[in-house]
Image: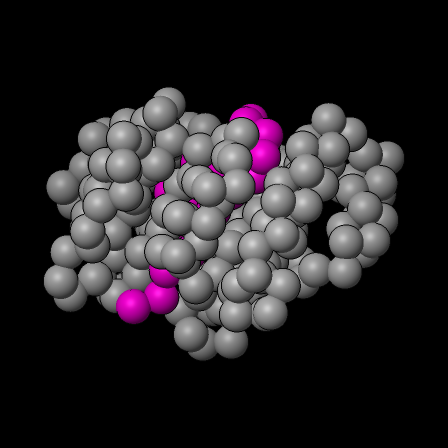
């Protein structure tokens, strides 16, 4: 089983969008996938409740009060972490993870929150020793926007791998309202968005 923690120290960076999108992508590849929601806002659980029976199945795990067991047979676990984690909470979630995906979007406030979160991560022995990989996802990008240029420069300064660069697309919100993600719809409309996720999904699926 590969266990993926999606987290950031600040809310509103698209954490649940990334977590649900990854779960849908892995399920679409016929991986037995579970999505654990550890955030009291329950955004990922709400998305799963809206998910139609015709979509690729994803098992729902409610970790909003405490971390729980993972059902037998699960091949990929995606964890939607809460914002404002303290050191002990990060340690507990890292124990249940193999890799950390950190979304950050083009906002100075978001970058400051990301820096604090990465600082907390860096204090964890498993991260310092390289046993837990950390990758960035640059989210809600707008081509040629100054904020996007600043975010690219900020990401380079962190010296962490950028596993995906996701454009700001209205389709994410549209599909989320139906419990779906871009990987649930084939065709030209979602193809550009799916291509932006490919490197990250390959990494988490063990293909990269």
Above or below, comparing residue 49 to residue 94 in the picture: above
Left or right? Give the position of 196 relative to 156: left
**Is residue 57 found left or right of 92 in the rendered image?**
left
Image vertical order of residue 204 relative to residue 190, above or below:
below
Residue 208: x and y in percent read: 51, 76
Name above or below for residue 23 compared with residue 141: below
Magenta segment: 1-22
Q: Residue at x 31, y 61 (%)?
A: 76
Q: Is residue 76 left or right of residue 204?
A: left
Q: Residue at x 56, y 61 (%)?
A: 125
Please identify the quarter of the rendering in which residue 120 is found. Answer: top right
Report x, y in % for residue 191: 49, 53
Report the residue at 46% width, 49% height from top: 91
Q: Position of residue 55 (x, y in %)?
A: 22, 46
| Residue 85 x, y percent position in the rendering | 51, 35
Quadrant where the image shows the N terminus: bottom left
Task: Determine whether, in the image, residue 2 is placed left or right of residue 55.
Answer: right
């Amino acid at each position: 089983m590969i266990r993926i923690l999606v987290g950031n120290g600040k809310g509103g960076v698209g954490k649940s969008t990334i977590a649900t999108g990854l779960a849908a992508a892995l399920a679409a590849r016929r991986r037995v996938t579970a999505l654990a929601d550890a955030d009291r806002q329950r955004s990922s659980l709400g998305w799963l409740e809206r998910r139609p029976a015709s979509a690729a199945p994803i098992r729902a795990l409610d970790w909003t009060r405490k971390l729980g067991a993972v059902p037998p047979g699960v091949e990929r676990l995606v964890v939607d972490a809460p914002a404002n984690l303290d050191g002990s909470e990060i340690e507990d979630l890292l124990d249940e993870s193999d890799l950390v995906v950190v979304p950050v979007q083009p906002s100075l406030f978001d970058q400051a929150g990301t820096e604090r979160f990465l600082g907390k991560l860096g204090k964890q022995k498993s991260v310092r020793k390289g046993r837990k990989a950390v990758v960035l996802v640059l989210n809600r990008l707008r081509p040629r926007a100054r904020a996007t240029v600043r975010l690219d420069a900020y990401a380079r300064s962190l010296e962490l791998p950028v596993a995906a660069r996701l454009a700001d697309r209205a389709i994410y919100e549209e599909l989320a309202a139906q419990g779906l993600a871009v990987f649930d719809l084939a065709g030209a409309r979602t193809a550009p968005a799916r291509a932006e996720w490919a490197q990250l999904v390959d990494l988490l699926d063990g293909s990269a």
